[in-house]
Image (cartoon, grey):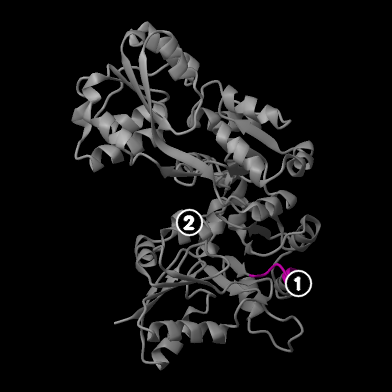
Amino acid sequence: MAKAYLIGAGPGDPGLITVKGQRLLAEADVVIYDYLASPELLAVCREDAERIYVGKKGGDHTLPQEEINALIVAKVREGKNVARLKGGDPYIFGRGAEEAEELLAAGLEFEVVPGVTSAVAGPAYAGIPLTHRKYASSVSFITGHEDPTKPDSAHNWQALATGTSTLCFFMGVKNLPYITEQLMKHGMRPDMPAALVRWGTTPRHRSWVSTVAKIAEVAAREKIQAPSMLVVGEVVRLRDTLNWFERQPLLGKGVVITRAREQASDLKEQLQRQGAFCHEFPTIAVRPCWDTPQTRETIAHLADFGWVVFTSVNGVRAFWDALAACGRDSRVLAGCQVAAIGPATAQELTQRGIVPDFVPERFVAESALEGLLARGAGSGAVLIPRARVARDVLPQGLSQAGARVEVLPMYETHLAEADAASTLELLREGMLHYVTFTSSSTVENFFALLAPEVLRPFVDQGLRLACIGPVTAATLERFGFSAHVQPRDYTIPALVQALLEDAA
């Protein structure tokens, strides 16, 4: 029977969704999601799942709550399992109970999957525990979204001001002067510590500490906007001591990743661990091209080659796909020596049971050529499974030394359909600080999507360009730009380290 699942997406960090919530999200036929639910969570959805955005932002409602309720009911009545993905927890100022009541009234089934509420997570990431044996033994969650012109407030301000240890106000920035005035008017001392936490747990996270008397001035001066959480209480004193998240070296730094979407995860994960906001702008799409008579003929005669040289992870993956299609496996390489250009390529081979005989110290074709010739590759047959279009330094150098070289096209790259408009908008908003290039193709395709003259003003204003190695940097120079960041080793971990050093 079809069912609706009211799932708490957590406070913003996609890693804070529950295991059950993520599983149900991956299984759902329809996903109805909010503004505060991380877009990264949608990546776990089925490709054929219907995705419907119903977010509310600054008073701009895509759909009124009544229409959201009707939409959930309608989709379940169609016989579909619906994941209603809500920021934070569905039952803490999330109107999840109203949606559940509508489902019950329609005779439909539902489940609630609790989520981590921003009232707990945002302060925790800012170094503010809501309870502490020395400072606080109780907590109140309060909506700050009250109309100050109403004749009566729904809150018992006397009780809030004097009867609880820690106060957490949701959606309180707009009414902050009214909230702090009411607290002091009803007995709270003006020097009570207070904090604002904005975009808690996300790479855009920031926090400010002051007192109840002055926190509204801080908000006005710093132009603090929603989504922000107001925390009031003695526990705020611990913020400077316990603030672990804001010490991340790349927190608040926006990094553009131009790699193919299939390859971006490693770089993205490493950057996010350091606090970076990663914007994927995949300039390359990879597609196989190995299904040819040449490939089948070559695989049938692999024993004729003394060396097989893999130049990329994509080449390894495509080669093993071709082996499988021909009914073969890693054993066909038993009589060959294997080389890998770069540690990532070597690791990809090792996962398939092949430990490379040679990995050059420098991960470029020139270094690989030198090492292969030193190992006698110039006197035999060499197979190079690689991209259809690539630099010819390696095959030409081996051929000139006397080797019989066969270049076997395994995959080809083409210009991806990336969203240049969203990247340009983030640049204008000042959200992006670095653009990373991991190959010459990423450079060429980036400027095919975003013209050099469009990027130039942002570089002049401080946008930094990072290249994985000298070949990529040389390609960047053809477009009139120099690499601000370039690692000593031409690897993803080294690129991340170079970004850390530059940001420091």
Residue found 72% across the figure and 81% down from its top: 147
Q: Position of residue 80 (x, y in %)?
A: 37, 79
Which quadrant does the C terminus fall into? top right
Front residue of 353 and 94:
353
Q: Nearer the viewer, residue 397 or 166?
A: 397
* Measured Cα–Cα span from mark 1 to mark 2: 36 Å
Residue at (71, 65) in percent of width and height:
189
Q: Which residue is mark 2?
A: 14
Q: Position of residue 427 (x, y in %)?
A: 71, 48
> As shown in the figure, which amino acid type bears the numbered disc 2?
Pro
Report the front residue among 114 and 473.
473
Whether the magenta-drawn stretch holds residue 251 is answered as no
Find the magenta span and give its range.
171-177
Q: Main secondary structure of the magenta part?
A: loop
| Crowding near the residue tagged with mark 2, few <14, some 14–19, many ≥20 C-alpha atoms within 10 Å | some
- Going by the numbered disc 1, the residue's amino acid type is Glu
Query: Is residue 248 among the parts visible in the rendering?
Result: yes
Give the mark toward the camera: 1 or 2.
2
> Horizontally, is 158 left or right of 125 in the view?
right
Task: Report the quarter where the N terminus lies.
Answer: bottom left
The reply to whether the magenta stretch includes residue 174 is yes
**Left or right side of 239 for 479:** right
Q: Position of residue 318 (x, y in %)?
A: 35, 38
Classify mark 1: residues with Cα within 10 Å, few (<14), some (14-19) or many (20+): some
Q: Which residue is label 1 attached to?
A: 181
Residue at disc 2, secondary structure = helix
Q: Name the secondary structure under disc 1.
A: helix
Answer with left or right where residue 175 lies relative to residue 128.
right
Q: Residue at x 62, y 32 (%)?
A: 466
Note whether residue 243 is visible: no
Give how far across and how far down residue 350 sits, in percent.
29, 29
Sequence-first disc among 1 and 2: 2
